[in-house]
Amino acid sequence: MGKVSVAEIKDLMKATGVGMMDCKKALEEAEGDTDKAILILREKGLANQAKKSGRVAAEGIVTSVVEGNVGAVVEVNIETDFAANNDEFKAFVAAVAKTVIEKAPADVEALKATVISGGDKTVEETLQDLFIKIRENMVIRRFKRFEGVLVPYVHGGGSIGVMVKLDTDLPADKVFEVGKNCALQVAAMNPGYLNREEVPADVLDEEKKILLAQMAEDPKMASKPEQVRAKIVEGKVGKFYSENCLLDQTFVKADVFEGTVGKYVEDAAKKLGGSIKVVEFARFERGEGVEKKEDNFADEVANMIKK
């Protein structure tokens, strides 16, 4: 065939993250068939998942799933919310969560090397196959596996995933509503810790340091005796607990119970005639901490041509 166009080369580069000359050769070999060119690049070990500068995967799905007494919270990212709604992508995320539950991998790298649930390829190989179809960068970002009495919650179609673990002498179905309400609290209020005992000493020290510095800047506070300021700081630390510790937070469903989450759980346990304790939770919010970058693909190609 004749020369392949610059537009065709750019599209293939965009789809695969492979260099310009390799894309040009693959298109020529494939006689302009993009899908065939992608397969050629894969066979040569070149078209792995796109690693395009500036193309950040910050959309995607967070899921929280329980099977029996084992559960997992998983976040898989992709570049656009449009692609995140792809049925095959959703099925892949579900299969990844099931793999975590069934195989208990140690970390993300171990997960990627594990044969995916319901398939005969590894998670990474399955991801690569999906990449060829969707043509967007995908990242299995993180997961957490739990065992015990578990209650999952997914908010906003996969924007937030929560898992709450309970210690109870009651049947799991009886405590489900309590766990669900706690999961809703975690999703809404994003506590950093379960209780005040979990707050690291250095975090508290830093908080006290900030509070004392604020007082030093306030003439009225600065003139107060040191012991008085110390007591005021302790009071403000109490506010830190009530904002950042799940069991110390005010229960958001005031129509159900007025008081802290800890008191709500105690009250529910008493009414059910048993013991219930929240012992652990996880909250993943889609894309949190991922820096989204604006990219200019024309500039990207221009820079590659210069090299």
Image (cartoon, rainbow, N blue to C red):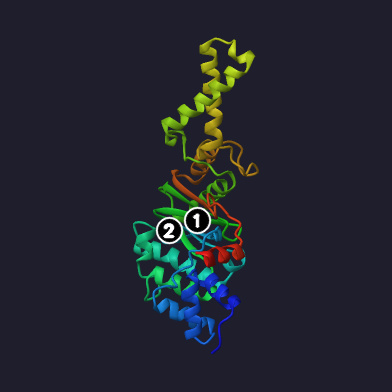
219 sits to left or right of 262:
right
The crowding category of the residue bearing disc 2, from other C-alpha atoms within 10 Å (few below 14, some 14 to 19, many at least 20), is many
Image mark for residue 71: 2
Residue on which disc 1 sits: 152
- Tell me which residue sits at (54%, 16%) in the image: 229
Q: Compute the Cα span from label 1 to label 2.
A: 8 Å
Q: Secondary structure at mark 1?
A: strand
Quick one: 304 or 58, which is closer to the camera?
A: 304
Q: Earlier in the sequence, mark 1 or mark 2?
A: 2
**Residue 290 screen position, x and y as percent:** 53, 52
- Residue 142 shows in this picture: yes
**Which quadrant would residue 214 be assigned to in this image?**
top right
Q: Quadrant of the N terminus?
A: bottom right
- In the image, is residue 144 above or below residue 67? above
Q: Which amino acid type is marked by label 2?
A: Gly
244 sits to left or right of 156:
left
Quick one: 123 or 45, which is closer to the camera?
A: 45
Q: Secondary structure at mark 2?
A: strand
- In the image, is residue 58 above or below residue 21? above
Quick one: 267 or 296, which is closer to the camera?
A: 296
Quick one: 11 or 206, which is closer to the camera?
A: 11
- Tell me which residue sits at (57%, 65%) in the image: 302
Q: Residue furthest front?
A: 306
Q: Which amino acid type is marked by label 1?
A: Pro
Given contact means CB atoms under 8 Å apart, are the residues at marks 1 and 2 in contact? yes
216 sits to left or right of 103:
right
- Residue 117 shows in this picture: no
**Residue 225 screen position, x and y as percent:** 54, 9
**Residue 222 screen position, x and y as percent:** 59, 13
- Tell me which residue sits at (57%, 46%) in the image: 185
Report how many numbered discs are placed on residues in the image.
Answer: 2
